[in-house]
Amino acid sequence: MKELILILMGGVLVNNYVLQRFLGICPFLGVSKKFNQATGMGVAVTFVMLCATAVTYPIQKLVLDKNGLGYLQTIVFILVIAALVQFVEIVLKKFIPALHKSLGVYLPLITTNCAVLGVTINNITDGYNFIESMVSSLGVGLGFLLAMILFAGVRSKIENCPSPNCIKGLPITLIAASIVSMAFLGFSGIVEAMLA
């Protein structure tokens, strides 16, 4: 149980895919302007990560590994993720059209979100079993959601503060992202303390 908690906390704080591994930067910078959009994207990515792990893990273990087809891992995982994103898009369009419209082009881009592909592949390469893979995906998804929400708050504050013209827009956004990323380095001591 302690190991599962460490995997979960590692995904959320210590090894945050956006702020520490720099995966999933496109939606992080593109959809974090408004709190509602950031939250919607974070929840959608978390859902896709969990579903992708639930589908890709058995495919890897029961089909690819058993038949010596490990070299097809990336393409198979991308196809699975693409199908799941289409499902999420259909559900959002049907039940939450405002969120579907606000996410715009970024929703289909979850298909190519390297954080989603990265978590499915890293779960396999890290040697996690199915339960550990699901916990890892949940942690990474919650970490993505946390990063999106925090950065949406930071960006709303930046927009209301005066800044020099030379750093308005993307430059100040990248500077703020780097500061948030450095703040997350402080969480690395948590795992060491939990292991002691």
Image (spheres, rainbow, N blue to C red):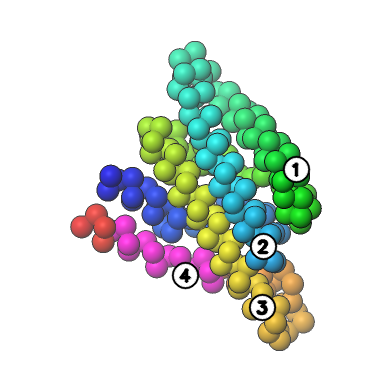
- Residue located at (45% from left, 50% from top): 139
Q: Can you identify the residue that label 1 sits on? A: 94
Q: Are marks 1 and 2 in contact (CB under 8 Å)?
A: no
Q: Are marks 2 and 3 in contact (CB under 8 Å)?
A: no
Identify the disc placed on residue 36.
2
Residue closer to the observer: 176 or 83 = 83
Query: Which is more N-terminal, label 4 or label 1?
Result: 1
Name the residue type under label 4: Ala
Q: CA distance from mark 3 to mark 1?
A: 34 Å
Q: Is residue 99 left or right of residue 47?
A: right
Name the residue type under label 1: Lys
Give percent across and percent down for residue 115: 57, 46
Residue 22 against residue 64 in the figure, above or below = below
Is any part of residue 120 visible from this angle? yes
Q: CA distance from mark 2 to mark 4?
A: 23 Å
Query: Which is more N-terminal, label 3 or label 2?
Result: 2
Identify the disc placed on residue 183.
4
Q: Residue furthest front?
A: 95
Q: CA distance from mark 1 to mark 4?
A: 39 Å
Q: CA distance from mark 2 to mark 3?
A: 17 Å
Name the residue type under label 3: Ile
Query: Which is more N-terminal, label 1 or label 3?
Result: 1
Give percent across and percent down for residue 47: 57, 44
Q: Are marks 3 and 1 in contact (CB under 8 Å)?
A: no
Q: Which residues are magenta?
A: 179-192
Quick one: SS at disc 4?
Answer: helix
- Residue located at (52% from left, 49% from top): 141
Give percent across and percent down for residue 160: 70, 82
Circle 1 packing at 10 Å, graded few (<14), some (14-19), many (20+), is few
Q: Is residue 89 left or right of residue 141?
A: right
Q: Which one is closest to the eye, mark 2 or mark 4?
A: 2
Q: Are marks 2 and 4 in contact (CB under 8 Å)?
A: no
